[in-house]
């Protein structure tokens, strides 16, 4: 089954639900950053949560960026998703393999709890909107739920999970958001509380072969499916884009790169790709810059 996000509503619109399968996406992220199991799980959870948030964006150019840093060994965990379903991100330390006493991957320990979750929404307006919440557990799902309660005043149940195979590849990954809409009645609140009490890990359900729609109907029999969004790992960086970025440097910096004979190496942190520009290529960029700035 391909990666997707299914959006639904239940109880006459009082509850909104998003279910996501992100297994292929997280596997691509793991490969790009050469992640060990705990790092892969931490990054995968943040990627999944951010992808779900971005599935409500109306414009392909709009984007959401989530940054978690609890000052644990993982360092900064960042994910960015746009309205077209493209998702990218990175983790400060991709080499973590930490396990709790119960045998589960110690994502909370990796991320830490002495820091914040910051969510920035770039909707094409003059200023992006940013919300910040303290990290409560480092387990990601609880932290996003707390963010929604504090920054967006939206009571939410957030489940995100990643299962990692013994060989380090991603076995299953996904997320489930259940949110009460403004004006929700007591019956809707009670229903969500009941669901929260019986909720199974979403990665387990995906690993068992359940579709996103089946997962939603498992908890809300009256759910009305509103739409499906494709989601994928895609950075969008390229040599051409970085060549344009180099052209924005001043002539002195470009000249120094040419004269030292080493050229330039540019690293895209989002997808861990390196782009090398020779001194000759930088000279061509400089000449193009001068031609553009020459009076007509």
Image (tube, helix red, strand yellow):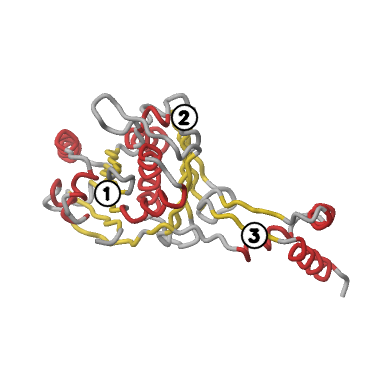
Q: Quadrant of residue 186?
A: top left
Q: Residues within 10 Å of mark 3 (few under 14, many from 20)?
A: some
Q: Quadrant of the N terminus?
A: bottom left
Above or below, 280 relative to 49: below
**Label 3 with label 1: CB-CB less than 8 Å:** no
Side (left or right) of 132 relative to 225: right
The residue under the point 20% across, 49% down is 207
Above or below, 130 relative to 57: above
Which of pointers 3 and 1 lies earlier in the amino acid sequence? 1
Q: Quadrant of the C terminus?
A: bottom right
From the image, tell me which residue sits under label 3.
Answer: 242
Which of pointers 3 and 2 lies earlier in the amino acid sequence? 2
Q: Residues within 10 Å of mark 2 (few under 14, many from 20)?
A: some
**Label 3 with label 2: CB-CB less than 8 Å:** no
Q: Quadrant of residue 247?
A: bottom right
**Where residue 99 sits: x, y (%)?**
32, 29
Question: 63 or 94: nearer the eye?
Answer: 94
From the image, tell me which residue sits under label 1.
Answer: 171
Question: 47 or 54: nearer the eye?
Answer: 47
From the image, tell me which residue sits under label 2.
Answer: 73
Above or below, 34 relative to 227: above
Disc 2 element: loop
Query: Mark 3 to mark 2: distance in Å?
Result: 30 Å
Q: Nearer the viewer, mark 3 or mark 2?
A: 2
Side (left or right) of 103 relative to 76: left
Instruction: Evaluate whether residue 283 shows in this view.
Output: yes
Query: Mark 3 to mark 1: distance in Å?
Result: 34 Å
The residue under the point 24% across, 41% down is 184
* Residue found farthest to the right: 295
């Amino acid at each position: 089954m391909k990666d997707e996000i299914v959006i639904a509503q239940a109880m006459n619109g009082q509850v909104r639900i998003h279910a996501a399968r992100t297994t292929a996406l997280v596997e691509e992220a793991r490969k790009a950053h050469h992640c060990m199991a705990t790092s892969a799980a931490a990054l995968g959870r943040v990627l999944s949560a951010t992808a779900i948030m971005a599935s409500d964006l109306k414009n392909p150019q709009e984007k959401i960026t989530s940054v978690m840093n609890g000052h644990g060994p993982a360092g900064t965990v960042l994910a960015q998703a746009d309205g077209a379903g493209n998702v990218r991100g990175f983790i400060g330390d991709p080499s973590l393999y930490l396990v709790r006493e119960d045998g589960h991957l110690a994502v909370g320990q990796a991320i830490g709890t002495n820091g914040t979750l910051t969510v920035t929404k770039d909707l094409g307006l003059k200023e992006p909107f940013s919300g910040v919440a303290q990290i409560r557990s480092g387990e990601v799902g609880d932290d996003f739920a707390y963010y929604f309660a504090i920054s967006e005043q939206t009571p939410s149940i957030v489940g995100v999970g990643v299962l990692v195979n013994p060989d380090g590849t991603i076995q299953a990954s996904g997320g489930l958001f259940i949110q009460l809409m403004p004006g929700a009645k007591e019956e809707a609140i009670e229903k969500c509380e009941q669901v929260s009490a019986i909720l199974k890990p979403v990665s387990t359900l995906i690993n068992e072969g359940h579709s996103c729609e089946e997962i939603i109907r498992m908890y809300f029999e009256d759910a009305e499916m509103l739409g499906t969004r494709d989601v994928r790992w895609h950075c969008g960086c390229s040599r051409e884009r970085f060549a344009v970025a180099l052209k924005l440097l001043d002539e002195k910096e470009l000249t120094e790169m040419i004269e030292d004979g080493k050229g330039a190496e540019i690293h895209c942190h989002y997808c861990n790709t390196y782009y090398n520009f020779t001194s000759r290529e930088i000279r061509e960029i400089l000449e193009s810059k001068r031609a553009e700035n020459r009076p007509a």
